[in-house]
Amino acid sequence: DGGITQSPKYLFRKEGQNVTLSCEQNLNHDAMYWYRQDPGQGLRLIYYSQIVNDFQKGDIAEGYSVSREKKESFPLTVTSAQKNPTAFYLCASSINREDTQYFGPGTRLTVL
Amino acid sequence: GENVEQHPSTLSVQEGDSAVIKCTYSDSASNYFPWYKQELGKRPQLIIDIRSNVGEKKDQRIAVTLNKTAKHFSLHITETQPEDSAVYFCAALYNQAGTALIFGKGTTLSVSS
């Protein structure tokens, strides 16, 4: 678990602003994921990437964007188009799509 | 689309009792079923997983069973302890290239002493 980090731990955003959440891993994993967690909703997949320079939309991609320019980094941008962005965001990585996912500590985003 | 149903949403047991959480999945070609435990304010952590070529797997007080015919799998915790109190998530991986894990909505387990 110590090999995957997220920053910041807490983030406050004003309405209309874009914000970027950082996710870094030093596990040499090919696959990386972003989830949103709301109370009673479980883990909902936003975006995932199975290899550098490639990513796919998950179930709730609207209002979010990602990039995967480096193997170890998978930043998530929450755009102003996301109408209800207040949530706990979790990043994860795995060797490949069929292997164990390891989660980062999460970023709690609050819209003021 | 693909779906994972998890029941119950909350479960309260006395210390020492057993706890069982059940999940069903929709795609019969699914081949990987992990269980995660998330303590309050912390990240989910894998506690046990099972692949479709196995019917049961145990790790001390924790076991997972898989019924491929009925398309359901269950987490069994024996001799529960207060530190088992957490939210538990099941997940299923559909055997289709390009897809990712689908998670259930979670079960909040409370173990009282």
Image: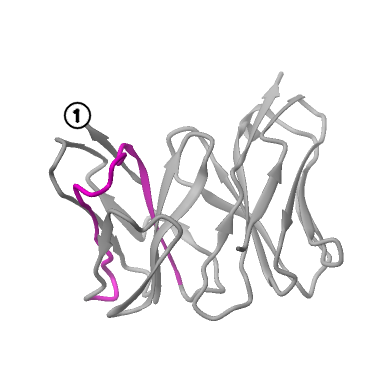
Residue type highlighted by circle 1: Leu
Foreground: B29 or B58? B29
- Quadrant of the image for the C terminus of chain B? top right
Residue sitting at 14 percent across and 35 percent down? A14
Return the x and y of residue B54 as percentages of the image width and height: 80, 70
Q: Quadrant of the N terminus of chain B?
A: bottom right
- The residue located at (79%, 35%) in the rendering is B79
B111 relative to A33, above or below = above
Numbered disc 1: secondary structure: loop
Q: Chain of mark 1?
A: A
Residue B28 seen in the figure: yes
- Closer-to-camera residue (A8/A41): A41
Above or below, A20 relative to B52: above
Q: Is residue A24 left or right of residue B36?
A: left
x%, y% of residue A63?
28, 53
Residue A16: name its quadrant.
Answer: top left
Is A92 a magenta residue? yes
Left or right of B97 in this view: A72: left
Q: Which residue is mark 1?
A: A112
Q: Nearer the viewer, residue A111 or A94?
A: A111
Q: Mark 1: few, some, or many residues within 10 Å (few <14, many ≥20)?
A: few
Magenta residues (range): A70-94
Q: Position of residue A101 (x, y in %)?
A: 50, 62
* Residue A105 shows in the view: no
